[in-house]
Amino acid sequence: MRVLYVEDSPRLLRSVAAALERTGYAVDTASDGEEGLWMAGCAAYDAVILDIMLPKLDGLTLLRRMREAGNDAHVLLLTARDTVAERVEGLRTGADDYLVKPFALEELLARVEALCRRTYGAKQNPIVVDDLSVDTAQRIVTRAGRPVDLTAREYNLMEYLARRRGEVVTRADIEEHIYNGESPTSNAVDSAVCILRRKLAIDNPAPLIHTRRGLGYVLGPDR
């Protein structure tokens, strides 16, 4: 999952971005509103965390311009001012959720996770596809009731495919949402999918990840 975090406090920007990355998100950051608006228009984000009090362009104006441009990314607003009027204004401007500073990091992570579920129309946890189960809260994958041992990046790929189960997911989609600004080699995605297929086949050889030649990959039972 790819997240944009716009925050002018260097300390908070570093600590929250690091926590998001440890949790498995690909994270882009911006330290002022103008940069944040530009970045919001450059990529498809699963969630945007947006401070209201920003230099150059305040968070509400940034959000308003995002919506005017047709950007429907799910937005979590952060503010130090806990007033009903500000919360109402933020929600009416187009925010999806609201969190008051200071906040517990665990709560922010839970809210971002909820926004990402909403992005893909998935409210349930775990995500179940045939005999595959992806627990996004505990980051545990099982197949046929047995745990699948995955690295952090393999899990991120698995979760992304699971959230988009039944859809064709292109290589470009995977690179954008999984590789966190890196420049993967030309066959990195194909190799990652191959490894994931092999690990998923240990307890059940029936394939779940299918190649759509020239298009990408689809997660689902073989029909």
Image (tube, rainbow, N blue to C red):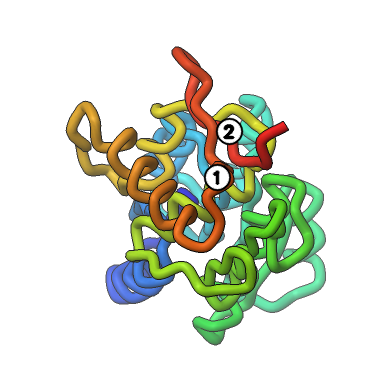
Q: Position of residue 79 (x, y in %)?
A: 58, 70
Q: In which quarter of the image is the C terminus?
A: top right
Q: Residue 137 carries which label?
A: none
Which residue occupies the extreme top position in the image? 214
Q: Identify the residue at horizontal 50%, vertical 82% (top origin).
A: 105
Disc 2 marks which residue? 218
Front-most of residues 166 and 15: 166
Q: Residue 161 carries which label?
A: 1
**Count of picture labels:** 2
Q: How crowded is mark 1: few (under 14 residues within 10 Å), some or many (20 or more)?
A: many
Q: Quadrant of residue 155?
A: bottom left
Residue type at numbered disc 1: Leu
Q: Position of residue 95 (x, y in %)?
A: 71, 52
Front-most of residues 185 and 179: 185
**Residue 124 in sight from this viewpoint:** yes
Q: In which quarter of the image is residue 98?
A: bottom right
Q: Which mark is first along the chain, 2 or 1?
A: 1
Residue type at numbered disc 2: Val
